Amino acid sequence: MNLTINPNPHRSASAALPALAAAGALGVLGGALWMQRQGFAPCPLCILQRMAYLAVLGFALVAAATARRSSAAVAATALVLGVVSAIAGFGVAARHVWLVLHPGQTCGLDPLATVINSWSLTHWFPSMFRADGFCADTPSLFGVSLPFWSALGFIVLAALLGVALASRNGRRRGAAA
């Protein structure tokens, strides 16, 4: 039996949190596509949230992949960009929550949808990025509207990546002392 002891247990933890964040973002994106297949067309704000989740996914994967290598600056930069993406996504989700709570207001099929639908990314992958729905018409999960869940998801992802970044910085300061 070959037993090895990890000399630096923090290294595996520094990869686990971004990997968990990536899995969460991938799960949300999969859930969004599943809801779309059920007949719920995404609105422009839904599409912007998908893009933010996709950015979090990409940055979290880079951070997880580089956490065990000597490229600490790349991992730290990816973590910071992942947190920024999650904060931006939360901002879009918060606006979407506001629209759900104020049904008289709507983004509808407004100029934002026209702009989003003209992007190359939308033409390459229309099933993921085409905005055809209304912002106030959102499905619910367990009695809670999806924009609320999305806002909560962005908070959790930002927290996971933020904790990974803080633990990474704390280890670096501890090693320097």
Image (cartoon, rainbow, N blue to C red):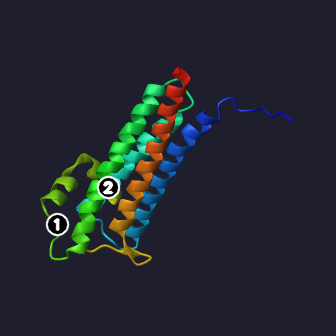
* Residue at the image position 38 percent from the left and 52 percent from the top: 53
x, y percent for residue 84:
33, 43
Left/right placement of residue 41 relative to residue 61 reads: left
Q: Name the residue beneath numbered marker 2.
A: 90
* Residue at the image position 26 percent from the left and 57 percent from the top: 92
Q: Nearer the viewer, residue 173 or 106?
A: 173
* Residue at the image position 41 percent from the left and 49 percent from the top: 158
- Residue 53, relative to residue 42: is it above or below? above
Q: Residue 40 sits in which quadrant?
A: bottom left
Q: How many marks?
A: 2
Q: Residue 128 sits in which quadrant?
A: bottom left
The furthest residue to the top: 176
- Going by the numbered disc 1, the residue's amino acid type is Leu
**Label 1: how many Cα within 10 Å (few below 14, some 14–19, many 20+):** some
Quadrant of image for the N terminus = top right
- Going by the numbered disc 2, the residue's amino acid type is Phe
Q: Name the residue beneath numbered marker 1.
A: 109
Residue 116 visible in the picture: yes
